[in-house]
């Protein structure tokens, strides 16, 4: 059996050796692959051109795959969403060359002890969104190579612009502008801190954190984002606390989960439900409310809302 000092020494060696080995492997991979495959600048430039030429008031459109999209330039994205995304997805985004060796080493160590921990940077995620591959080590190496290439061809703001046009934000919603309009009926530039934190937490696992499918998990994820922003100095404690307490109204058809909750509280359908009943059933956790916002006498079907706090 290893002694305690022996285990500590081996762990220390691993902490130093793994980043160095990854750096060497990625460097060799990059320069070898770069000689064989050039970065497809034209393909990326077309996406950026569409985003920058888009009218800020463009209504989301459904593409041929049934996904809602709305091109948006980085300058039309609220700074709070940019900060929240960097804080929760890639805190060293502004300083790494496309691959964060520290994060990869940490992910490798986590894997050795059976814990989950992602090492992908925003740049690597953007590569994955552009050119999907089956998960695995070969895919990670290919993404790392393309990420290093991307950082040499594009600015950090260019890459963020790509990310905010390609990232999934739950259900069939792609991109920050489409998400802001489908969830909140406002543009990405108008997002408040609580709304931005909610959206920033979605791309990592859109199905798990979709507030219409799992409001409680969505709120927990929102606080995780706000906590990261607080730790990294993007917001103050009063700002984070206020944003977490603020109720967020979500536009959209209620999920089956929401309907089920309402049914258990005595509603035969998913029409208007008294807030007091929900508050009694789920005290001090979150507030889920479905509201009929249709104008009186309107023949248009009622807009259904889900509200969490």
Image (tube, helix red, strand yellow):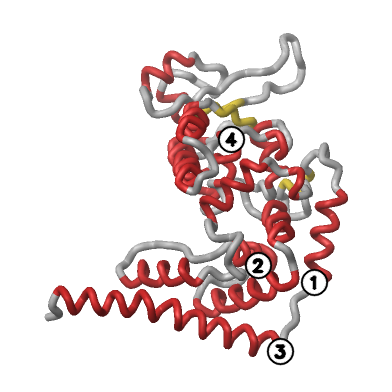
Looking at the image, residue 44 lies above or below residue 248: below
Residue at the spot of label 3:
35
Give the mark toward the camera: 2 or 4: 4
Q: Could you tell me how far apart the alpha carbons at marks 1 and 2 are, in whole angstroms?
A: 12 Å
Q: Secondary structure at mark 3?
A: loop
Which one is earlier in the sequence, the residue at label 2 or at label 4? 2
Q: Could you tell me how far apart the alpha carbons at marks 2 and 4 are, in whole angstroms?
A: 27 Å
Q: Quadrant of residue 285?
A: top left
Q: Quadrant of residue 28?
A: bottom right
Q: Could you tell me how far apart the alpha carbons at marks 3 and 4 are, in whole angstroms?
A: 44 Å
Q: What's the mark number on residue 122?
A: none
Q: Could you tell me how far apart the alpha carbons at marks 1 and 4 are, in whole angstroms?
A: 34 Å
Residue at the spot of label 1:
41
Which one is earlier in the sequence, the residue at label 2 or at label 3? 3
Residue at the spot of label 4:
193
Residue at the spot of label 2:
127
Which one is earlier in the sequence, the residue at label 3 or at label 1? 3
Which one is earlier in the sequence, the residue at label 3 or at label 4? 3
Q: What residue is at 62 percent from the left and 33 percent from the top?
A: 192
Q: What residue is at 42 percent from the left and 62 percent from the top?
A: 117
Q: What residue is at 58 percent from the left and 60 percent from the top?
A: 93
Q: What residue is at 51 percent from the left and 17 percent from the top?
A: 273
Q: Quadrant of residue 43?
A: bottom right
Tag 3 near tag 4, CB within 8 Å: no
């Amino acid at each position: 059996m290893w002694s305690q000092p022996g285990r500590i020494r081996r762990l220390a060696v691993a902490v130093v050796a793994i980043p160095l080995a990854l750096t060497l492997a990625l460097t060799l991979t990059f320069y070898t692959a770069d000689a064989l495959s050039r970065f497809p600048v034209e393909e990326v430039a077309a996406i950026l051109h569409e985003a920058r030429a888009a009218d800020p008031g463009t209504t989301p459109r459904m593409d041929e795959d049934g996904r809602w999209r709305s091109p948006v330039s980085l300058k039309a994205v609220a700074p709070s969403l940019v900060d929240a995304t960097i804080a929760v997805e890639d805190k060293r985004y502004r300083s790494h060359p496309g691959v964060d060796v520290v994060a990869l080493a940490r992910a490798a160590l986590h894997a050795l002890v059976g814990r989950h921990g992602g090492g992908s940077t925003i740049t690597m995620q953007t590569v994955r969104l552009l050119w999907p591959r089956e998960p695995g080590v070969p895919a990670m190496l290919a993404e790392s190579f393309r990420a290093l290439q991307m950082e040499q061809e594009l600015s950090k703001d260019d890459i963020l612009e790509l990310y905010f046009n390609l990232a999934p934000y739950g259900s069939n919603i792609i991109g920050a502008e489409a998400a802001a309009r489908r969830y909140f009926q406002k543009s990405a530039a108008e997002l408040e801190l609580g709304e931005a934190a909610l959206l920033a937490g979605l791309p990592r696992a859109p199905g798990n954190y979709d507030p219409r499918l799992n409001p409680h998990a969505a709120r927990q994820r929102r606080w995780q984002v706000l906590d990261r922003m607080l730790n990294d100095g993007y917001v103050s404690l009063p700002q984070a606390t206020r944003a977490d307490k603020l109720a967020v109204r979500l536009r959209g058809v209620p999920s089956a989960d929401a309907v089920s909750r309402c049914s258990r509280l005595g509603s035969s359908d998913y029409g208007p439900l008294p807030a007091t009943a929900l508050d009694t059933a789920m005290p001090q956790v979150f507030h889920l409310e479905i509201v009929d916002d249709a104008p009186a006498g309107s023949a248009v079907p009622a807009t259904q809302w889900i509200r969490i706090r």
